[in-house]
Image (cartoon, rainbow, N blue to C red):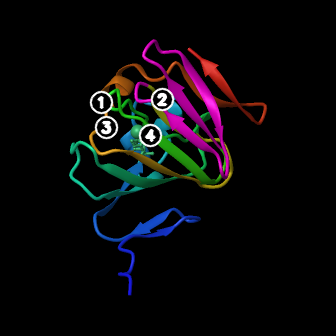
């Protein structure tokens, strides 16, 4: 008899259970300084959940050759006219790529190259995005439902959040006349 699987996924709802699974929640207050409309940000509840991430770490972070597997559930909403989004990051190791696979919701994957050239790619159920190691990546929920996407990346990719915290992306995703639009800096 084969052994039972150690990790079990709930694809549609964005859940995973098993050894080495860690869940973390990002509340609005954790994203201070990232949204363009500071007064609108300050008027909102800092404890409001914006997204949660479940990561399966089968090897220690930083170990070469391993893979991480995770899922992000990003809530719908806006700060002023800017849609809820993930913090966004470069990988600390700029040679480490990543896949994002969307199962629910409607989003935009913001990508930025080292020269700050920024563009958006549509995320919808069944889209798969390959993100080159040198591209910063941030996900924006432009729909009315939670946006759920799965990801796979190298265990030695690491996170460089500081570069984004300092200079952001070259564009924001905002609502104009009821539709999402890229607003370039
Ligand atoms: C993802 C992201 C996740 C949350 O697992 O870490 O969507 O986004 P932030 O890390 O920008 O807060 C990933 O890209 N890992 O490399
Ligand atoms: Zn990443």
Residue 36 visible in the picture: no
Discs 3, 1 touching: Cβ within 8 Å:
yes
Q: Where is residue 46 in the image (x, y as percent from the top left)?
A: 42, 47
**Label 1 or label 2, whichever comes before in sequence order:** 2
Taking depth in this image into account, of 14 and 156 the one nearest to the observer is: 156
Marking on residue 93: 1
Residue 13, by quadrant, is: bottom right
Q: Which residue lies furthest to the right in this view?
A: 177
Q: Where is residue 104 in the image (x, y as percent from the top left)?
A: 63, 56
Q: What element carries label 1?
A: loop
Q: Residue furthest top?
A: 115
Q: In this view, does 170 lie above or below 111?
A: above
> In the image, is residue 133 part of the stretch drawn in magenta?
yes
Residue 96 visible in the picture: yes
Marking on residue 38: 2
- CA gap, disc 4 and disc 2: 31 Å
- CA gap, disc 4 and disc 1: 12 Å
**Label 2 or label 3, whichever comes before in sequence order:** 2
Residue at the spot x=48%, y=29% of the render? 38
Quarter of the image for the N terminus: give it: bottom left
For label 4, the residue is 98
- CA gap, disc 1 and disc 2: 32 Å
For label 4, being within 8 Å of ligand 2 is answered: yes
**Label 4 or label 2, whichever comes before in sequence order:** 2
Residue at the spot x=64%, y=46% of the render? 127
For label 3, the residue is 157
- The magenta-colored residue range is 107-134
Foreground mark, 1 or 2, reads: 1
- CA gap, disc 4 and disc 3: 9 Å
Q: What element carries label 4?
A: strand
């Amino acid at each position: 008899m084969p052994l039972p699987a150690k990790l079990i996924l709930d694809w549609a709802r964005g859940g995973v259970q098993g050894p080495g699974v860690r869940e973390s929640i990002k509340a609005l207050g954790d994203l201070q300084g990232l949204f363009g409309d500071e007064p609108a940000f300050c008027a909102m509840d800092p404890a409001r959940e914006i997204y949660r991430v479940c990561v399966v770490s089968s090897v220690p972070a930083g170990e070469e050759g391993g893979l991480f597997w995770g899922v992000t559930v990003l809530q719908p909403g806006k700060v002023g006219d800017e849609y809820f989004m993930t913090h966004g990051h470069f990988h600390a190791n700029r040679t480490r790529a990543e896949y994002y696979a969307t199962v629910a919701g409607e989003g935009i994957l913001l990508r930025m190259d080292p020269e700050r050239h920024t563009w958006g790619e549509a995320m919808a159920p069944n889209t798969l995005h390959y993100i080159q190691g040198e591209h910063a990546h941030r996900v924006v929920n432009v729909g009315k439902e939670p946006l759920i996407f799965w990801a796979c990346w190298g265990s030695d990719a690491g996170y460089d959040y500081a570069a984004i915290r300092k200079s952001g992306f070259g564009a924001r995703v905002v609502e104009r006349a009821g539709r999402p639009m890229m607003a370039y800096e």
